[in-house]
Amino acid sequence: MIKNVGIVGAGQMGCGIAHVAAMAGYKVHIYDLSAERAETGLATINGNLARQVSSGKMSDEDRKKALALIKGSSDINDLSDADLVIEAATEDETVKRKIYGQVCAVLKPEAILATNTSSLSITRLASATDRPERFMGIHFMNPVPVMKLVELVRGIATEEVTFAAAKAFVTSLDKTITVAEDFPAFIVNRILLPMINEAIYTLYEGVGSVEAIDTAMKLGANHPMGPLQLADFIGLDTCLSIMQVLHDGLADSKYRPCPLLVKYVEAGWLGRKSGRGFYDYRGEVPVPTR
Ligand SMILES: CC(=O)CC(=O)SCCNC(=O)CCNC(=O)[C@H](O)C(C)(C)COP(=O)(O)OP(=O)(O)OC[C@H]1O[C@@H](n2cnc3c(N)ncnc32)[C@H](O)[C@@H]1OP(=O)(O)O
Ligand SMILES: NC(=O)C1=CN([C@@H]2O[C@H](COP(=O)(O)OP(=O)(O)OC[C@H]3O[C@@H](n4cnc5c(N)ncnc54)[C@H](OP(=O)(O)O)[C@@H]3O)[C@@H](O)[C@H]2O)C=CC1
């Protein structure tokens, strides 16, 4: 029975997952490397809850109740009460493997450990834990409070009881599940990221400007965001990691990350979260960088 949920990583996804879990009545603890990051995360969650209050989706009383259920810290021992820990740290296998070593050392033996990875092999990540049978992928979409879908991914060793508990948990958050096999980037990102990468090639080859490409896909294909705007929203580091996993894992040149994407990441232009990507977010309105 899941009551206490631990989250690793107070970034956009960790905060989003904490937000929806608390709304459903779970006690949540967010752990991040820096206490300051965990604090900023709590403030972000409060801001997003307040948005739902002002649009009439939630009462202010429910906002306060949800917020009171969430704590944050930089002490990994605070995850020792968790029945389920969802790791939502940076999309980097080395980082995640290191986290599993630290988390497993404090976790209850019966607790489930899940990853929100966008692309990495669940089976390979599971091998870095002490509980491959109680490990799986629970892949939320961004922004978590708004997006209905969650992909569930079993590793080779995931037990049925683990899958059933994860499914019950996700359903209790009022999300719809889809099951994906453990292939690079699963379903959503296997389809979405090559589209985003192609949009970046379209920019790189001078077929259109940032604005032209985004307008084309918003008005010409009815996407809620243009692909470059969406890339900035996801995070260009995450987009690049996913393309690298597709390229390495499927060994097909059609997944080659666009050199322009590589350049932006090397510059530290990671999109919205760093203030600059295909758009510059430091002013009042986003301004295209090309
Ligand atoms: C990379 C991966 O591994 C997988 C992924 O996640 S891929 C990314 C998947 N996500 C997408 O494709 C998102 C595409 N974009 C969209 O759907 C929309 O642009 C959007 C929902 C993000 C924003 O919609 P919008 O109409 O442009 O903006 P906005 O009016 O601000 O927001 C719409 C609603 O969502 C709410 N919202 C937006 N972000 C929110 C957040 N972080 N928390 C809470 N609510 C939020 C707003 O409050 C608003 O609610 P109301 O309609 O009740 O006012
Ligand atoms: N962005 C998206 O649209 C989606 C992302 N995902 C996946 O979710 C995960 C998180 O992505 P996202 O939230 O966007 O990334 P962010 O960069 O916003 O957040 C990652 C967080 O993890 C923290 N972190 C890094 N290393 C550690 C560590 N060793 N211990 C604890 N915390 C750590 C980072 O801290 P610091 O900043 O200090 O390094 C940061 O706060 C990734 O696996 C990503 O692929 C899944 C669905 C959608």
Image (cartoon, rainbow, N blue to C red):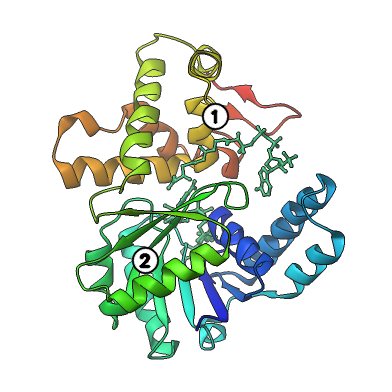
Query: Reading the chain from its start, which is encountered first: label 1 or label 2?
Result: 2
Above-or-below relation of 11 to 110: above
Q: Which residue is mark 2?
A: 96
* Tag 2 secondary structure: helix
Residue occupying the point 34% across, 24% down: 198
Q: Amino acid at mark 2?
A: Lys
**Numbered disc 1: secondary structure:** helix
Task: Give the left or right position of residue 103, taking residue 61 as reference.
Answer: left
- Disc 2: CA contacts within 10 A as few (<14), some (14-19) or many (>=20): many
> Is residue 73 something one can see in this rendering?
no
What separation in Å lies between label 1 and label 2 (alpha carbons)? 27 Å
Q: Tell me the quadrant of ligand 1.
A: top right
On the image, the x and y values in percent for residue 24 come to 65, 68
| In-front residue for pair 191/210 | 191
Q: Which mark is residue 280?
A: none
Amino acid at dot 1: Gln
Q: How many marks?
A: 2
**Residue linked to disc 1:** 229
Q: Disc 1, disc 2: CB below 8 Å?
A: no
Name which residue lies at 25% across and 66% down: 155
Where does residue 6 sit, x and y in percent of width and height? Answer: 53, 75
Q: Is mark 2 within 8 Å of ligand 2?
A: yes
**In x, y percent, where is residue 67?**
75, 68
Against 279, is 85 above or below? below
